[in-house]
Amino acid sequence: MSSAAPVAAAPASAGASPVVVTMVVMLGSFMTVLDSTIANVALPHMQPSLNAAADSITWVLTSYIVATAIATPITGWLAARIGRRRLFLWSVAIFTIASLACGLAGSLSEMVLYRIIQGASGAFLAPLGQAYVLDAWPPAKHGPAMAWWGVGVMVGPILGPVVGGWLTDNFDWRWVFLINLPFGLICFTTAAACLPEPRLPARRFDMLGFALLALGMAALQLALDRGQQLEWLESWEVRLEAGLAVAGLWAFGVHALSRPGAIVDRELLTNRNALTGMLFITLVGFLLVATTALLPTMVQTLYGYPVVAAGELMMPRGIGMMMAMMSAGQLLGRGVDPRGMLAVGFVSTGAALWGMSLFSPDQGAWPFIVTGFFQGAGLGMIFVPLNTVAFASLAPALRTDAAAIFMLLRNIGGSIGISVAVAMLQRQTQISHADLGSGITPFSLPWADPATLAAAGAGAVVSVLDGTVNRQALMIAYLDVFRAMAIMSVSVLPLLLILRSNKPSGKPSPPVHLAD
């Protein structure tokens, strides 16, 4: 497929301010990322309203995640087919209408259907937003611009449980979805007024590649989400899903590397910075979402915090993340090597997680606040330079595809993080319970003989003793998981040597070409 002469992007609204464009697409990205976690705390309240069983109500979350995973890879093709601006507007409109439908759903089947529509339509917003930000600003400004946009993408998962818990406690679980209506209307009207319409190269739809990638990603998401409930490989369902995931993704990788014009361009899989960035963004998703899943449960179960207070303890992570992103954007604009900033980010994240592994059962709120702030700052220091250095060596026409893959891998990393963290937590709890229980015998503590206690009518003492052991075992398990995540954070530091430092030149991006 040959190219015609260069054609500058044709904006729908000439002279749109890059600041306005960034704020508009950040709002759209924030809505869809927030909805990936906002419904988590509302599930117990949804269950009686939707007449759903405890093991089926989780499909409210699973359906959204799977639909997002399937739809995200076709963002680049759809943007080239119908236009980036038009796709963004349609996505916001359908996402907003689906949110209204979710808020009015009367049964579980209706809710799952609307969540699938919501996830599929919202999947395009974050990749399109990232591509718009990179196109709206000159390369020298990519760092600060990505910092502003990244606030919506990275802080959304942290705020989700907080906002969801507050809305559920003070109003009703339906407001978890209805809250999207005013923001969706604002985003749609402002996007229609200011977003430009760049001309992208025409491309064929890679049906085989999409089918293989969709099969692999959907099966992987289902295996990760359902595995915890079904005892992982003890279940034939999870075995089948895991097998389909491996086969689908392997076949897709071979297809993408061997065929030009695949749904994921071969350059994305052979570019050193882009490929290393994919690995790093998966790890960022793992650390961000896994910690978001573990800490609220920990502070409620072991420390007795109510839901809203537990959410408030997560806020310092968001504050640290925002401050670090703003600082990272400024440092990149001044020519600081992004690899050094990535090293600082991973070390800070690892140090914060190691600090979490030193929590004690009777501590106050300050250890949560301090470690949360530094973990958020570390992740924020990673996100901005990572996106900048990974995209700097890619052609502008590949930005939408690359943004879609990065967003997909961040979500996949989050799903893996939740599954691995919860599995480790359960396993370490069992091991710690066995270790602690083995030390409580009639030989070490004569009064702990069950027969003696039963004869004395002290059954309540046995219950208290067992509860104490369970609590201590769970505490030890949490600390073990945090320690493992800390080691994981710093173990990837040698991979920074693979990255090339692409310093922005300040020149405008080359024009996008029209295909014949």
Image (cartoon, rainbow, N blue to C red):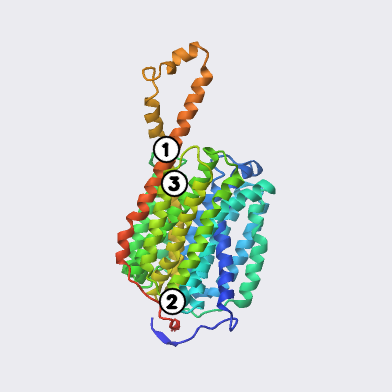
Q: Which residue is mark 3?
A: 356
In front: 27, or 241?
27
Q: Which residue is mark 2?
A: 397
Q: Which residue is mark 1?
A: 476
Which amino acid, mark 3?
Met
Looking at the rendered structure, the secondary structure element under dot 1 is: helix
Image spot of residue 505 (x, y percent): 40, 80
Q: Nearer the viewer, mark 2 or mark 1?
A: 1
Image spot of residue 383 (x, y percent): 44, 63
* Residue at far top of view: 455
Residue 14 seen in render: yes
Mark 3 and mark 1: Cα distance apart in space = 11 Å
Which amino acid, mark 1?
Ile
Which amino acid, mark 2?
Ala
Residue 40 seen in render: no
Q: Earlier in the sequence, mark 2 or mark 1?
A: 2
* Residue at far right of view: 171
Look at 63% across and 69% down and name the residue there: 188
In front: 121, or 421?
421
Image spot of residue 130 (x, y percent): 49, 69
